[in-house]
């Protein structure tokens, strides 16, 4: 049906009398109701104007860099105030303030300040968490859990858990989906509603 209408238009249009609009003088064979695409050259730019813009961009870039550095410094100072006990391992900083909470609250607390619950991925990181937990004599929650699929522990971002340090006989809990670290650095799965040391990593 559409094809029929279009083909009749093609037949009808050439029969119309051309108008004397400016478009007709430019494009012979232009018909009323036809579409015309007009492409214009961009206006010429003054090279000095471009130079001024480049300078402005450079100044803005320098200001942005200074602002980022100052924000980072402020954030670090702020973190030191909220979580005064910290230790660095490579690019990671583990930090705590000695408070305890259930897993969900601990998770939200760390996220609120731009981090996540401590999730050691090797022995060195595990020992750094142990060191801080020992200062408070408290078992710390770790980030990995098997809340999604029983028996399959994953990192908070979905990564499979490659490093582990389970205590003998652990994990053993169908209803224990969170991990606590004992004060001998070994791990136990326990229920997520237990209150354990809030240990974040940034
Ligand atoms: C037992 O000993 P304790 O309380 O740290 C259990 C864990 C359970 C936990 C539950 C060897 O640990 O697997 O998660 O109770 N340990 C053993 O509270 O059975
Ligand atoms: Ca479980
Ligand atoms: Ca257990």
Image (cartoon, rainbow, N blue to C red):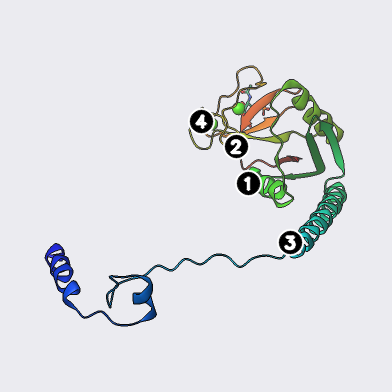
Residue carrying label 3: 47
Q: Give the distance between the C-alpha atoms of the residues marked 4 and 2, in whole angstroms.
A: 9 Å
Q: Position of residue 128 (x, y in %)?
A: 80, 28
Q: Give the distance between the C-alpha atoms of the residues marked 2 and 3, in whole angstroms.
A: 68 Å
Q: Are marks 1 and 3 in contact (CB under 8 Å)?
A: no
Residue carrying label 1: 104
Q: Earlier in the sequence, mark 2 or mark 3?
A: 3
**Closer to the observer: label 1 or label 3?**
3
Give SS at disc 2. Answer: loop
- Indicate if the residue with disc 2 has its beta carbon within 8 Å of ligand 1: yes
Residue carrying label 4: 174
Rendered-image quarter of ligand 1 = top right
- Indicate if the residue with disc 4 has its beta carbon within 8 Å of ligand 2: yes
Q: Which mark is residue 191?
A: 2
Q: Position of residue 68 (x, y in %)?
A: 81, 52
Q: Position of residue 130 (x, y in %)?
A: 79, 28
Left or right: residue 118 compared with residue 30: right
Q: Nearer the viewer, residue 31 or 61?
A: 31
The local crowd at label 2, few if under 14, some if 14 to 19, many if 20 or more residues have their Cα within 10 Å, is: some
Q: Is residue 53 above or below residue 101?
A: below
């Amino acid at each position: 049906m559409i094809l029929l209408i279009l083909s009749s238009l093609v037949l009808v249009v050439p029969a119309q009398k051309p108008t004397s609009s400016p478009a007709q003088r430019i494009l012979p064979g232009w018909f009323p109701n036809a579409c015309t695409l007009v492409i214009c050259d961009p206006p010429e730019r003054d090279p000095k104007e471009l130079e001024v813009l480049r300078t402005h961009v450079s100044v803005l870039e320098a200001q942005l860099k200074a602002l980022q550095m100052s924000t980072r410094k402020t954030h670090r100072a702020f973190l030191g105030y909220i979580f005064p006990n910290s230790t660095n391992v490579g690019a990671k900083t583990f930090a705590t303030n000695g408070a305890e909470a259930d897993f969900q609250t601990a998770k939200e607390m760390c996220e609120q300040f731009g981090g996540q619950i401590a999730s050691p991925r090797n022995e060195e990181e595990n020992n750094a968490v142990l060191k801080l937990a020992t200062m408070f004599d408290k078992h710390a929650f770790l980030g990995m859990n098997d809340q999604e699929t029983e028996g399959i522990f994953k990192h908070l971002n979905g990564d499979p858990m490659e490093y582990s340090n389970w205590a003998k006989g652990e994990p053993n809990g169908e209803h224990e989906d969170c991990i606590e670290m004992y004060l001998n650095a070994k791990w136990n799965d326990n229920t997520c509603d237990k209150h354990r040391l809030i240990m974040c990593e940034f």
